[in-house]
Amino acid sequence: MTAASTNLHFHGLNIPPSCHQDEVIHTSIQPGGPAFEYRVKIPASQPPGLYWYHPHPHGFSEAQVLGGASGALIVEGIEHVRPDVSGLPERVLILRDQITASGSTADSDDAKGKDISLNFVPVAAPLSLPATLQVRPSEREFWRVLNASADTFFDLQLLVRLNGQTTTQAQPMNLVALDGAPLQAENRMNILLPAGGRAEFVVTTPPAATFAQLVTRSYDTGPDGERTPYRAIANIVSRPTAPPAPSIIPESPGAADRKIEPLSRVAPIRQRKVYMSEDRSGSQPKYLITVEGETPKPFDMNFQKPDITVKQGTVEDWTIENRAREAHSFHIHQLHFQVMKRNGTAVEEPSLRDTIELPYWDGTSAYPSLSLRMDFRDPEIIGTFLYHCHILEHEDAGMMGSIQVLP
């Protein structure tokens, strides 16, 4: 891998980790070389929803994603499992980040964090002027939001100041899918998206001539983390003559009969502990993800033995701990998982995820942790692939591990 090498990872898709599909350990496409063709077959079992693709050359992923090399990918058919979105206007909103004009890339030294953009419209320092989103008044719309940033958390909120009010009020967002997996709808006043995360939700656009904004709230990434300030992403201009939404979700005759056993009801055959940590003793931080009992070390692309070996057809429970004074974002290729516990306490979170945030360790309390039920039952995922922090600065610097799924 060099700065000029590239490849593609199809984030969230349950497809084989093999060459020309979703393999990033050995696949290295060089400039000036022969054309390299990807042929990806989406399995019928893939949940309909929002996914994405981006380069994954180890050591250089952050720079390429910061440069805008990413895109949304939609597996159609969500109206069959969530008929309440049938016929709604649909918007795909892609959030990215980029290095500020100062050129600073240091996470804890840059007090402003990175600049951001919405569908390539920059919201850049020093003015950070929001983009403009034109909508028609008081209509229900289906928004699909992708956090395609390399390093930035977005804590989304929809703010509206109705006539006669002096302050903006948060409006409910009816969440219907996370990370491409439909879930039982619930109203949220804010939705936190780590880098790589996706949310799909229904909103009611504000009345005409109403002040409204899509914003990201400040998110505390910890004393060693990059500052993630409050920012207005877009001014929402509501007027009857606004252009229609780019597309419409098809009408559905009704929900499909999908009798799938919830992952929470499948007994795990094994428990593991994996922890994220940082070594800041030298001039440059070392970012590490380690299986409990092993010696912490940065990821090496020339590994001879995978960090974890599992059997296809099984389900395991992994406890992921954050032992760093900085928030991280756990992602695993090829599959989804379900959150079973947060900080040791059982939770009811039926949504399936492929990326999830881990809050920072305060230095004195118990390590923040998640218990994740990992699903290795799909025969398509046999092979060797990766898990890592999806803050790509950390992944490039070594916070990544390998896993082999055996037949």
Image (cartoon, helix red, strand yellow):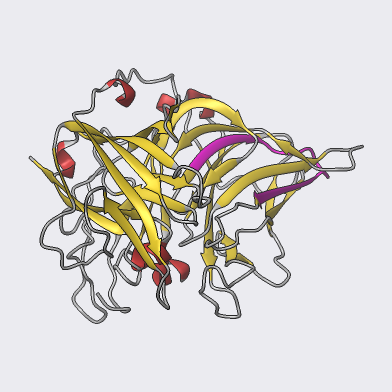
Q: Quadrant of the N terminus?
A: bottom left
Q: Mainly helix, strand or loop, the magenta region?
A: strand
Report whether 8 appears left or right of 237: left
Q: Residue at x 22, y 49 (%)?
A: 293
- Magenta span includes 228: no
Does residue 73 appear anywhere in the picture?
no
Q: Residue at x 33, y 24 (%)?
A: 264
Choose top left, top right, bottom left or bottom right for residue 53.
bottom left
Report whether 83 appears left or right of 186: left
- Give percent across and percent down for residue 173: 62, 35
- Give percent across and percent down for residue 80: 41, 26
- Give percent across and percent down for residue 258: 32, 20
Does residue 407 appear anywhere in the picture?
yes
Q: Which residues are magenta?
A: 199-216
- Magenta span includes 214: yes
Report whether 379 appears left or right of 32: left
Report whether 65 appears left or right of 273: right
Q: Along the line of sight, which residue is nearer the eye, 138 or 318? A: 318
Q: Residue at x 29, y 68 (%)?
A: 57
Please, which residue is most extreme toward the front here? 364
* Rendered position, 27 above or below 274: below
